[in-house]
Amino acid sequence: MISTRVLSLSALLCVLTAPFCLDSVAAQTVAAKQGFHAVRLPASFFAGNRARLLAELKKMGPGTIAVIKSMPEQNRNGDSTHMYRQDSDFYYLTGVEEPEAVAVLDADSNQAYTLYVRKRDQRREAYDGARLGVEGALKLGADKAESFPAAEESLKSVVNKAQRVVLVSNFDEDFRRKMLDWIYPFGSDNNHSSHKRILVDGRHIIAEMRVIKQVAEIDMLQRAVDVTIAGHLAAMKASLSAINEGEVAGGFQGSVRSMGARFTGYDTIAGAGRNSCVLHYLTNDHDIEAGSLMLLDAGAEVGYYTADVTRTWPVSGQFSKEQKAIYELVLKAQNAAIDLIKPGRVHHEGFDAAMRILSDGLVDLGLLQGDKDSVYKSGAYSRFTMHGISHWIGLDVHDTGDYQMETGKRGGRRVLVPGMALTVEPGIYIPKDANDVDAKWRGIGVRIEDVILVTPEGNRNMSDKLPRAVKDVEAVLKKRD
């Protein structure tokens, strides 16, 4: 069950950001007792998702099953593996967090949900921790449960009896090949018989289920955003005395982990100076030059839901004239795009509005030459903008769901509806080696990103407690020891 002890946002923003908040010591005490450690969505959430998928399976006709595979463990190096994180689709339907599991949903059965899990193993559990086993699988809501390796034949039998198999095995190629061998046995005349087994890629079905966030998901996403905000403030504080980018990245990562974020939703991007112009800069170990900008793109994951927030600030505590000009142009574009996020508007409208503002602004600043209409139509602005400005967010940082779709028909622009969660993140990047640009602009990279929820009335900026305006950013930076 989800913890009902929710830490207030004001306390969250104090935690690990002293001396920004006089009540930081008290807030840290509260966070230690509450925080967001081990919060998870309730079993009813996963059961509801399975029921929705079963309804889709029934529409396909009798004999339809869905087979959903857990994320395989990933090798890091040698005999070491990365810290395990479950596949989002599998988690969305089961709530199961361990590897080597398979879920089967049978639309024709009174016991619709079967969960196959690892066998209990006292020795391995002494090394790796407790396993669910059959008993644990049943407690998590399975109608039936069996354990591997004995369950292999049972799973194969279920697949062979089906007329239609909806398969979700996004990242397990070995399992996918095994399923293909079972569904289309080598040398069989299955394709020529009266009974032709059909294989369906189930990823798109679940992706569309995940686009519209449920109330419990929105609550969890907000928690992830709140922890992320505190992490960004801690990183801003760290940057005031940091010599290296790693200190800034560490300020964020240490803060969010201490507040219950077992993972970050993606590798932290902490680029200073010229590195702020590298879109997915992950090294985070270069020295910080005096007077440079710091770009931090970082999101905490809480209860499997991730935030995605970017802020850019001057490590000196105050923007230079050129830095401020670029920053305010990006902020103007972001605000225009956010204003267009509301039910009935098309997702791509925000991009178009932001790009027009950036293009015109780059002309005004002398970074692009020509009349504004011609420059915009030519796409010349893309030299300094380079990327889109929005994506879905939820269980994955780039969450699932189509963008080019309208009322179920591919090819159209997707219309926004309440419950969608997305980012807005325009940016301008002027590389250090852009020798045809006035030197005063070179090495300035600015991105501003927030998490936006589409509401019936319009939208809600879920990360608006993290300062964006120049004066507010500088005010935070002035609160030094």
Image (cartoon, rainbow, N blue to C red):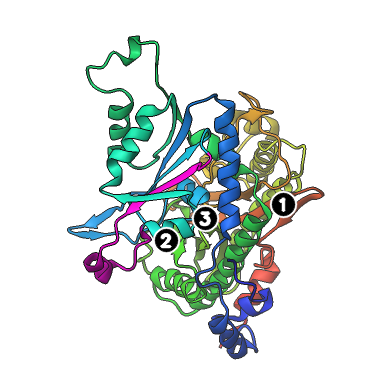
To which quarter of the image does residue 381 belong?
top right
Q: Which range is magenta?
A: 110-133
Residue 273 versus residue 464: which sits nearer the camera?
Answer: 464
Question: How packed is label 1: few (under 14 Cα within 10 Å), some, or many (20 or more)?
Answer: some
- Is residue 265 visible from the viewing direction of this image? no
For the residues labelled 2 and 3, say whether their Cβ atoms are less than 8 Å apart. Answer: no
| Mark 3 or 1, closer to the camera | 1
To which quarter of the image does residue 180 belong?
top left
Residue 291 as seen in the image, left or right of residue 462: left
Quadrant (top left, top right, bottom left, bottom right) of the C terminus:
bottom right
The residue most toward the left is 78
Alpha-carbon span between mark 2 and mark 1: 48 Å
The residue at the point 54 percent across, 24 percent down is 61
Quadrant (top left, top right, bottom left, bottom right) of the N terminus:
bottom right
The residue at the point 53 percent across, 52 percent down is 395
Q: Is residue 8 above or below residue 103?
A: below
Question: How packed is label 3: few (under 14 Cα within 10 Å), some, or many (20 or more)?
Answer: many
Type of amino acid at the residue the image marks with label 3: Gly
The residue most toward the right is 457
Q: Which mark is residue 5?
A: none
Question: How packed is label 2: few (under 14 Cα within 10 Å), some, or many (20 or more)?
Answer: some
The residue at the point 51 percent across, 54 percent down is 141
Alpha-carbon span between mark 3 and mark 1: 18 Å
Residue 139 versus residue 71: which sits nearer the camera?
Answer: 139
Residue holding disc 2: 136
Residue 231 is inside the magenta segment: no
Residue 120 is inside the magenta segment: yes
Q: Which mark is residue 335?
A: 1
Residue holding disc 3: 445
Identify the element where label 3 is drawn: strand
